[in-house]
Amino acid sequence: MNKFPHDFFWGASTSAHQVEGGNLHNDWWLAEQGGSLREASGQACRHYDLFKEDFAIAKELGHNCHRFSIEWSRIEPQEGEFQPFEIEHYHKVIAELRRLGIEPVVTLHHFTNPVWFSRKGGWVDSGLQRYFLSFVEKIVSEFCGEVKFWITINEPLVYSSHSYLLGVWPPQERSLSKTARVTLNMARAHIKAYRIIHDIYRRRGLARPMVSIAANLQAFEPCRPTLKNKLAVYLRDKLYNFYFIEELLRRKSLDYIGLNYYSRNLADVESWGIRHLLLDTCKYNHHPLRKNSLGWDIYPQGIYKLLIALKRYGLPVLITENGICTEDDALRWDYIREHLQMVHRSMQEGVNVLGYIYWSLIDNFEWDKGFGPRFGLVDIDYRDQKRTIRPSAKKLSEVFKTGLI
Ligand code: GAL
Protein backbone atom coordinates (compact mmCIF):
# COMPACT_ATOMS: atom_id res chain seq x y z
CA MET A 1 0.00 0.00 0.00
CA ASN A 2 1.17 3.52 -0.81
CA LYS A 3 0.46 6.41 1.50
CA PHE A 4 -0.09 10.02 0.46
CA PRO A 5 0.88 12.90 2.77
CA HIS A 6 -1.70 13.83 5.42
CA ASP A 7 -2.03 17.40 4.10
CA PHE A 8 -2.67 16.32 0.50
CA PHE A 9 -5.52 18.08 -1.32
CA TRP A 10 -8.23 15.69 -2.49
CA GLY A 11 -11.21 16.87 -4.49
CA ALA A 12 -13.05 17.18 -7.75
CA SER A 13 -13.56 19.88 -10.34
CA THR A 14 -16.38 21.49 -12.29
CA SER A 15 -16.68 24.55 -14.52
CA ALA A 16 -19.53 27.05 -14.54
CA HIS A 17 -20.96 26.57 -18.01
CA GLN A 18 -20.78 22.79 -17.78
CA VAL A 19 -22.80 22.49 -14.58
CA GLU A 20 -24.59 25.68 -13.55
CA GLY A 21 -27.29 25.94 -16.20
CA GLY A 22 -28.77 29.11 -17.66
CA ASN A 23 -25.57 30.89 -18.65
CA LEU A 24 -27.43 33.10 -21.09
CA HIS A 25 -24.80 35.71 -21.72
CA ASN A 26 -21.81 33.80 -23.04
CA ASP A 27 -20.57 32.84 -26.50
CA TRP A 28 -21.32 29.14 -25.96
CA TRP A 29 -24.96 29.79 -25.16
CA LEU A 30 -25.22 31.92 -28.31
CA ALA A 31 -23.64 29.23 -30.49
CA GLU A 32 -25.82 26.55 -28.89
CA GLN A 33 -28.95 28.50 -29.86
CA GLY A 34 -27.55 28.89 -33.39
CA GLY A 35 -27.66 25.11 -33.80
CA SER A 36 -24.05 24.55 -34.87
CA LEU A 37 -23.35 22.41 -31.79
CA ARG A 38 -24.62 18.94 -30.95
CA GLU A 39 -26.62 19.95 -27.86
CA ALA A 40 -27.48 23.05 -25.88
CA SER A 41 -26.35 23.33 -22.25
CA GLY A 42 -29.79 24.54 -21.12
CA GLN A 43 -30.26 23.91 -17.42
CA ALA A 44 -27.18 21.62 -17.35
CA CYS A 45 -27.01 20.15 -13.80
CA ARG A 46 -28.76 23.13 -12.18
CA HIS A 47 -25.70 23.38 -9.98
CA TYR A 48 -26.31 27.13 -9.73
CA ASP A 49 -29.30 26.28 -7.52
CA LEU A 50 -28.17 22.91 -6.20
CA PHE A 51 -24.57 23.68 -5.22
CA LYS A 52 -25.24 23.03 -1.53
CA GLU A 53 -26.55 19.56 -2.31
CA ASP A 54 -23.51 18.86 -4.50
CA PHE A 55 -21.03 20.12 -1.91
CA ALA A 56 -22.73 18.01 0.77
CA ILE A 57 -21.96 14.98 -1.40
CA ALA A 58 -18.34 16.09 -1.82
CA LYS A 59 -18.07 16.45 1.94
CA GLU A 60 -19.59 13.03 2.53
CA LEU A 61 -17.02 11.60 0.11
CA GLY A 62 -14.15 13.09 2.08
CA HIS A 63 -13.18 15.87 -0.32
CA ASN A 64 -11.09 18.63 1.25
CA CYS A 65 -10.79 20.85 -1.83
CA HIS A 66 -13.01 21.77 -4.76
CA ARG A 67 -12.24 23.44 -8.07
CA PHE A 68 -14.89 25.50 -9.86
CA SER A 69 -15.05 28.54 -12.12
CA ILE A 70 -16.64 31.95 -11.74
CA GLU A 71 -18.62 32.74 -14.88
CA TRP A 72 -17.46 36.06 -16.30
CA SER A 73 -20.65 36.49 -18.36
CA ARG A 74 -22.80 36.26 -15.22
CA ILE A 75 -20.73 38.82 -13.38
CA GLU A 76 -20.48 41.20 -16.35
CA PRO A 77 -23.28 40.37 -18.82
CA GLN A 78 -22.85 43.78 -20.50
CA GLU A 79 -19.57 45.65 -20.76
CA GLY A 80 -18.78 47.36 -17.45
CA GLU A 81 -22.07 46.35 -15.79
CA PHE A 82 -21.03 44.18 -12.90
CA GLN A 83 -23.89 42.36 -11.18
CA PRO A 84 -23.79 42.54 -7.36
CA PHE A 85 -26.37 39.76 -7.17
CA GLU A 86 -24.13 37.33 -9.06
CA ILE A 87 -21.07 38.33 -7.04
CA GLU A 88 -23.14 37.56 -3.97
CA HIS A 89 -23.96 34.13 -5.40
CA TYR A 90 -20.28 33.18 -5.57
CA HIS A 91 -19.74 34.53 -2.04
CA LYS A 92 -22.36 32.01 -0.97
CA VAL A 93 -20.66 29.24 -2.96
CA ILE A 94 -17.30 29.92 -1.33
CA ALA A 95 -18.83 30.38 2.13
CA GLU A 96 -20.50 26.99 1.82
CA LEU A 97 -17.23 25.32 0.83
CA ARG A 98 -15.42 26.99 3.73
CA ARG A 99 -18.18 25.98 6.15
CA LEU A 100 -17.62 22.37 5.08
CA GLY A 101 -13.85 22.67 5.45
CA ILE A 102 -13.31 22.39 1.68
CA GLU A 103 -10.56 24.55 0.14
CA PRO A 104 -11.80 26.44 -2.95
CA VAL A 105 -9.63 26.45 -6.08
CA VAL A 106 -11.09 29.16 -8.29
CA THR A 107 -10.79 29.41 -12.08
CA LEU A 108 -11.34 32.81 -13.69
CA HIS A 109 -11.66 31.74 -17.32
CA HIS A 110 -12.91 28.30 -18.30
CA PHE A 111 -13.50 28.46 -22.09
CA THR A 112 -16.55 30.79 -22.10
CA ASN A 113 -16.60 34.52 -22.87
CA PRO A 114 -19.30 37.14 -22.47
CA VAL A 115 -21.03 37.69 -25.82
CA TRP A 116 -20.12 41.39 -25.82
CA PHE A 117 -16.42 40.50 -25.44
CA SER A 118 -16.45 37.97 -28.27
CA ARG A 119 -18.39 40.38 -30.53
CA LYS A 120 -15.59 42.91 -30.12
CA GLY A 121 -13.10 40.27 -31.30
CA GLY A 122 -12.39 38.29 -28.13
CA TRP A 123 -8.94 36.87 -27.54
CA VAL A 124 -7.74 37.48 -31.12
CA ASP A 125 -7.35 41.19 -30.50
CA SER A 126 -4.49 41.98 -28.12
CA GLY A 127 -6.16 45.27 -27.14
CA LEU A 128 -9.07 43.46 -25.53
CA GLN A 129 -7.24 41.65 -22.73
CA ARG A 130 -7.89 44.68 -20.57
CA TYR A 131 -11.52 43.62 -20.29
CA PHE A 132 -10.54 40.28 -18.84
CA LEU A 133 -8.08 42.01 -16.55
CA SER A 134 -10.70 44.36 -15.17
CA PHE A 135 -12.91 41.33 -14.46
CA VAL A 136 -9.94 39.72 -12.68
CA GLU A 137 -9.32 42.86 -10.66
CA LYS A 138 -12.98 43.06 -9.66
CA ILE A 139 -13.31 39.41 -8.68
CA VAL A 140 -10.02 39.10 -6.85
CA SER A 141 -10.68 42.31 -4.89
CA GLU A 142 -14.00 40.78 -3.85
CA PHE A 143 -12.76 37.32 -2.96
CA CYS A 144 -9.16 37.74 -1.85
CA GLY A 145 -10.10 37.28 1.79
CA GLU A 146 -11.72 33.93 1.02
CA VAL A 147 -9.54 32.32 -1.65
CA LYS A 148 -5.90 31.25 -1.73
CA PHE A 149 -5.69 29.13 -4.92
CA TRP A 150 -6.41 30.83 -8.25
CA ILE A 151 -6.32 29.54 -11.80
CA THR A 152 -6.43 32.44 -14.21
CA ILE A 153 -7.08 30.55 -17.46
CA ASN A 154 -8.07 26.95 -18.00
CA GLU A 155 -6.19 25.13 -20.77
CA PRO A 156 -5.26 28.10 -23.00
CA LEU A 157 -4.01 25.82 -25.79
CA VAL A 158 -7.12 23.66 -25.76
CA TYR A 159 -9.19 26.83 -26.00
CA SER A 160 -7.16 28.35 -28.84
CA SER A 161 -6.88 25.12 -30.83
CA HIS A 162 -10.52 24.04 -30.51
CA SER A 163 -11.91 27.52 -31.18
CA TYR A 164 -9.49 28.79 -33.83
CA LEU A 165 -7.67 25.81 -35.38
CA LEU A 166 -10.04 22.84 -35.36
CA GLY A 167 -13.11 25.08 -35.65
CA VAL A 168 -15.23 22.99 -33.29
CA TRP A 169 -15.85 25.49 -30.48
CA PRO A 170 -17.14 29.07 -30.77
CA PRO A 171 -16.27 31.04 -32.84
CA GLN A 172 -15.54 27.91 -34.92
CA GLU A 173 -12.68 29.27 -36.99
CA ARG A 174 -9.79 27.50 -38.69
CA SER A 175 -6.78 29.76 -38.80
CA LEU A 176 -3.25 28.96 -37.68
CA SER A 177 -2.35 32.62 -37.31
CA LYS A 178 -5.39 33.40 -35.13
CA THR A 179 -4.62 30.34 -33.01
CA ALA A 180 -1.12 31.69 -32.42
CA ARG A 181 -2.44 35.17 -31.62
CA VAL A 182 -5.04 33.90 -29.16
CA THR A 183 -2.44 31.73 -27.43
CA LEU A 184 -0.03 34.63 -27.15
CA ASN A 185 -2.75 36.98 -25.87
CA MET A 186 -3.75 34.47 -23.24
CA ALA A 187 -0.15 34.14 -22.09
CA ARG A 188 0.13 37.92 -21.81
CA ALA A 189 -3.20 38.16 -20.01
CA HIS A 190 -2.12 35.53 -17.51
CA ILE A 191 1.14 37.34 -16.77
CA LYS A 192 -0.71 40.59 -16.13
CA ALA A 193 -3.45 38.87 -14.13
CA TYR A 194 -0.79 37.19 -12.00
CA ARG A 195 0.64 40.60 -11.09
CA ILE A 196 -2.79 42.11 -10.45
CA ILE A 197 -3.70 39.26 -8.10
CA HIS A 198 -0.44 39.45 -6.15
CA ASP A 199 -0.70 43.26 -5.89
CA ILE A 200 -4.17 43.03 -4.39
CA TYR A 201 -3.03 40.57 -1.73
CA ARG A 202 0.07 42.64 -0.98
CA ARG A 203 -1.88 45.91 -0.67
CA ARG A 204 -4.32 44.28 1.72
CA GLY A 205 -1.60 42.64 3.79
CA LEU A 206 -2.86 39.15 3.02
CA ALA A 207 -0.69 36.03 2.84
CA ARG A 208 0.66 35.32 -0.65
CA PRO A 209 -1.89 33.63 -2.91
CA MET A 210 -1.08 30.65 -5.12
CA VAL A 211 -1.69 31.55 -8.77
CA SER A 212 -1.34 29.39 -11.87
CA ILE A 213 -3.05 28.21 -15.03
CA ALA A 214 -4.48 24.74 -15.60
CA ALA A 215 -2.35 23.29 -18.39
CA ASN A 216 -3.63 20.38 -20.42
CA LEU A 217 -0.63 18.15 -21.10
CA GLN A 218 -0.73 15.06 -23.27
CA ALA A 219 1.51 12.02 -23.33
CA PHE A 220 2.86 12.27 -26.87
CA GLU A 221 4.28 9.01 -28.21
CA PRO A 222 5.41 8.05 -31.72
CA CYS A 223 3.37 5.27 -33.35
CA ARG A 224 6.03 3.80 -35.64
CA PRO A 225 9.47 5.21 -34.76
CA THR A 226 9.89 7.08 -38.05
CA LEU A 227 11.75 10.38 -38.35
CA LYS A 228 8.47 12.24 -39.01
CA ASN A 229 6.81 10.72 -35.94
CA LYS A 230 9.77 11.43 -33.69
CA LEU A 231 9.92 15.00 -34.92
CA ALA A 232 6.17 15.32 -34.34
CA VAL A 233 6.53 14.16 -30.73
CA TYR A 234 9.41 16.54 -30.18
CA LEU A 235 7.41 19.48 -31.59
CA ARG A 236 4.20 18.62 -29.78
CA ASP A 237 6.00 18.26 -26.47
CA LYS A 238 7.77 21.53 -27.01
CA LEU A 239 4.92 23.61 -28.42
CA TYR A 240 1.88 22.06 -26.78
CA ASN A 241 3.14 20.77 -23.43
CA PHE A 242 6.00 22.97 -22.32
CA TYR A 243 6.33 26.21 -24.30
CA PHE A 244 3.46 28.03 -22.59
CA ILE A 245 4.54 26.99 -19.11
CA GLU A 246 8.13 28.00 -19.85
CA GLU A 247 7.04 31.42 -21.08
CA LEU A 248 5.12 32.00 -17.86
CA LEU A 249 8.04 30.76 -15.78
CA ARG A 250 10.38 33.10 -17.60
CA ARG A 251 8.09 35.95 -16.56
CA LYS A 252 7.94 34.62 -12.99
CA SER A 253 4.20 34.27 -13.07
CA LEU A 254 3.52 30.80 -11.68
CA ASP A 255 3.37 29.82 -8.02
CA TYR A 256 2.56 26.20 -8.86
CA ILE A 257 1.70 24.23 -11.98
CA GLY A 258 -1.91 23.19 -12.51
CA LEU A 259 -1.84 19.93 -14.47
CA ASN A 260 -4.81 18.54 -16.40
CA TYR A 261 -4.03 15.08 -17.74
CA TYR A 262 -6.28 12.61 -19.53
CA SER A 263 -4.67 10.59 -22.27
CA ARG A 264 -2.01 9.55 -24.74
CA ASN A 265 -1.62 11.04 -28.22
CA LEU A 266 -0.10 8.56 -30.66
CA ALA A 267 1.60 10.57 -33.38
CA ASP A 268 1.50 9.07 -36.88
CA VAL A 269 2.33 11.71 -39.45
CA GLU A 270 1.14 11.22 -43.02
CA SER A 271 3.19 13.87 -44.77
CA TRP A 272 5.48 16.78 -44.10
CA GLY A 273 3.87 20.11 -43.28
CA ILE A 274 3.23 21.82 -39.99
CA ARG A 275 -0.48 20.86 -39.73
CA HIS A 276 0.40 17.18 -40.21
CA LEU A 277 3.30 17.33 -37.78
CA LEU A 278 1.11 18.92 -35.13
CA LEU A 279 -2.15 17.07 -35.63
CA ASP A 280 -1.90 13.65 -37.33
CA THR A 281 -2.54 10.70 -35.04
CA CYS A 282 -2.61 6.95 -35.62
CA LYS A 283 -5.88 5.94 -37.27
CA TYR A 284 -5.35 2.19 -37.16
CA ASN A 285 -5.34 1.52 -33.43
CA HIS A 286 -1.74 0.28 -33.52
CA HIS A 287 -0.59 -0.21 -29.91
CA PRO A 288 -4.18 -0.56 -28.63
CA LEU A 289 -5.08 0.44 -25.09
CA ARG A 290 -8.30 0.51 -23.07
CA LYS A 291 -10.34 3.57 -24.00
CA ASN A 292 -12.85 5.96 -22.50
CA SER A 293 -16.26 6.41 -24.11
CA LEU A 294 -14.90 9.14 -26.39
CA GLY A 295 -12.19 6.76 -27.65
CA TRP A 296 -9.29 8.37 -25.77
CA ASP A 297 -6.50 5.99 -24.77
CA ILE A 298 -6.14 5.15 -21.09
CA TYR A 299 -2.46 5.63 -20.37
CA PRO A 300 -1.58 6.04 -16.68
CA GLN A 301 2.17 6.01 -17.42
CA GLY A 302 1.60 9.34 -19.15
CA ILE A 303 0.84 11.21 -15.93
CA TYR A 304 3.99 9.78 -14.38
CA LYS A 305 6.15 10.80 -17.34
CA LEU A 306 4.72 14.30 -17.36
CA LEU A 307 5.09 14.79 -13.62
CA ILE A 308 8.71 13.71 -13.86
CA ALA A 309 9.20 16.14 -16.76
CA LEU A 310 7.65 18.98 -14.74
CA LYS A 311 10.08 18.35 -11.88
CA ARG A 312 12.77 20.38 -13.66
CA TYR A 313 10.78 23.57 -13.11
CA GLY A 314 11.10 23.25 -9.33
CA LEU A 315 7.50 24.23 -8.61
CA PRO A 316 4.80 22.27 -6.80
CA VAL A 317 2.21 20.65 -9.05
CA LEU A 318 -1.51 20.53 -8.35
CA ILE A 319 -3.37 17.98 -10.46
CA THR A 320 -6.29 20.19 -11.39
CA GLU A 321 -8.00 17.61 -13.65
CA ASN A 322 -7.74 13.90 -14.31
CA GLY A 323 -10.66 11.71 -15.19
CA ILE A 324 -12.55 9.40 -17.48
CA CYS A 325 -15.90 9.37 -19.23
CA THR A 326 -17.30 5.87 -19.30
CA GLU A 327 -20.47 3.85 -18.90
CA ASP A 328 -18.38 1.24 -17.07
CA ASP A 329 -17.86 2.41 -13.53
CA ALA A 330 -15.43 -0.43 -12.74
CA LEU A 331 -13.22 0.97 -15.50
CA ARG A 332 -13.52 4.42 -13.91
CA TRP A 333 -12.14 3.03 -10.68
CA ASP A 334 -9.29 1.24 -12.50
CA TYR A 335 -8.47 4.50 -14.27
CA ILE A 336 -8.38 6.49 -11.04
CA ARG A 337 -6.47 3.86 -9.06
CA GLU A 338 -3.83 3.38 -11.74
CA HIS A 339 -3.33 7.12 -12.18
CA LEU A 340 -3.03 7.64 -8.43
CA GLN A 341 -0.43 4.90 -8.25
CA MET A 342 1.56 6.74 -10.91
CA VAL A 343 1.17 10.04 -9.05
CA HIS A 344 2.46 8.39 -5.90
CA ARG A 345 5.39 6.89 -7.78
CA SER A 346 6.38 10.32 -9.12
CA MET A 347 6.21 11.72 -5.58
CA GLN A 348 8.56 9.02 -4.36
CA GLU A 349 10.91 10.21 -7.06
CA GLY A 350 10.83 13.73 -5.74
CA VAL A 351 7.96 15.47 -7.53
CA ASN A 352 6.18 17.85 -5.19
CA VAL A 353 2.49 17.15 -5.81
CA LEU A 354 0.06 19.19 -3.72
CA GLY A 355 -3.13 17.36 -4.51
CA TYR A 356 -5.38 15.44 -6.86
CA ILE A 357 -8.58 16.95 -8.24
CA TYR A 358 -10.73 14.53 -10.24
CA TRP A 359 -12.72 15.67 -13.29
CA SER A 360 -15.55 15.85 -12.50
CA LEU A 361 -17.61 15.91 -9.33
CA ILE A 362 -20.83 15.41 -11.31
CA ASP A 363 -21.70 14.39 -14.87
CA ASN A 364 -21.99 17.52 -16.98
CA PHE A 365 -22.14 19.28 -20.34
CA GLU A 366 -19.08 18.09 -22.23
CA TRP A 367 -18.87 21.03 -24.66
CA ASP A 368 -19.29 20.02 -28.33
CA LYS A 369 -19.90 16.40 -27.24
CA GLY A 370 -23.02 17.34 -25.26
CA PHE A 371 -24.33 15.43 -22.25
CA GLY A 372 -23.41 11.93 -23.51
CA PRO A 373 -19.96 11.48 -21.93
CA ARG A 374 -20.17 10.63 -18.22
CA PHE A 375 -17.18 11.95 -16.33
CA GLY A 376 -18.83 12.31 -12.92
CA LEU A 377 -18.12 10.70 -9.60
CA VAL A 378 -21.81 11.35 -9.24
CA ASP A 379 -24.37 10.34 -11.86
CA ILE A 380 -26.90 12.93 -12.95
CA ASP A 381 -30.30 11.89 -14.21
CA TYR A 382 -31.07 14.86 -16.44
CA ARG A 383 -34.81 14.13 -16.40
CA ASP A 384 -35.19 15.01 -12.74
CA GLN A 385 -31.69 16.21 -11.72
CA LYS A 386 -31.35 13.33 -9.29
CA ARG A 387 -27.81 12.77 -8.02
CA THR A 388 -26.54 9.21 -7.45
CA ILE A 389 -23.09 8.54 -6.06
CA ARG A 390 -21.21 5.99 -8.16
CA PRO A 391 -19.35 3.04 -6.56
CA SER A 392 -16.04 4.42 -7.92
CA ALA A 393 -16.67 7.63 -5.95
CA LYS A 394 -17.03 5.60 -2.77
CA LYS A 395 -13.82 3.71 -3.44
CA LEU A 396 -12.04 6.98 -4.12
CA SER A 397 -13.43 8.43 -0.91
CA GLU A 398 -11.65 5.63 1.00
CA VAL A 399 -8.40 6.83 -0.53
CA PHE A 400 -9.28 10.42 0.35
CA LYS A 401 -10.04 9.46 3.95
CA THR A 402 -7.09 7.12 4.56
CA GLY A 403 -4.48 8.45 2.11
CA LEU A 404 -3.85 4.85 1.10
CA ILE A 405 -3.86 3.51 -2.44
C1 GAL B 1 -10.83 19.51 -20.02
C2 GAL B 1 -11.71 20.69 -19.69
C3 GAL B 1 -12.97 20.35 -18.97
C4 GAL B 1 -13.59 19.03 -19.38
C5 GAL B 1 -12.55 17.94 -19.53
C6 GAL B 1 -13.06 16.63 -20.07
O1 GAL B 1 -10.10 19.78 -21.16
O2 GAL B 1 -11.01 21.62 -18.91
O3 GAL B 1 -13.83 21.43 -19.10
O4 GAL B 1 -14.41 19.18 -20.45
O5 GAL B 1 -11.51 18.36 -20.35
O6 GAL B 1 -12.99 16.58 -21.45
Image (cartoon, grey):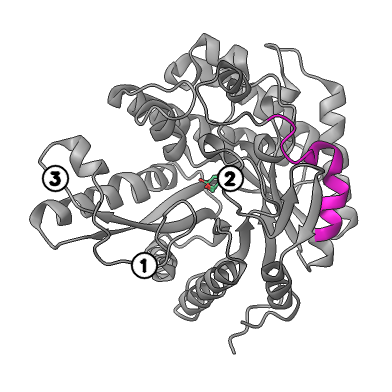
For the residue pair 126 and 30, the one nearer the viewer reads as 30
Quadrant of the rendering where the N terminus is positioned: bottom right
**Dots 1 and 2: beta carbons under 8 Å?**
no
Quadrant of the rendering where the C terminus is positioned: bottom right
For the residue pair 287 and 107, the one nearer the viewer reads as 287
Between discs 1 and 2, the one toward the N terminus: 1
Q: CA distance from mark 3 to mark 1?
A: 22 Å
The amino acid at mark 3 is Glu
Q: Position of residue 176 (x, y in %)?
A: 29, 26
Is the residue marked by circle 1 packed among few (<14), some (14-19), or many (20+) residues within 10 Å?
A: few
For the residue pair 289 and 96, the one nearer the viewer reads as 289
Q: Position of residue 261 (x, y in %)?
A: 48, 57
The amino acid at mark 1 is Leu
Q: Is residue 103 above or below residue 22?
A: below
Q: Is residue 8 something one can see in this rendering? A: no
Residue assigned mark 3: 270
Q: Position of residue 224 (x, y in %)?
A: 15, 62
The amino acid at mark 2 is Gly
Residue assigned mark 1: 289
Magenta range is: 42-57
Q: Is residue 54 magenta?
A: yes
Is the residue marked by circle 3 packed among few (<14), some (14-19), or many (20+) residues within 10 Å?
A: some
Q: Which mark is residue 198?
A: none
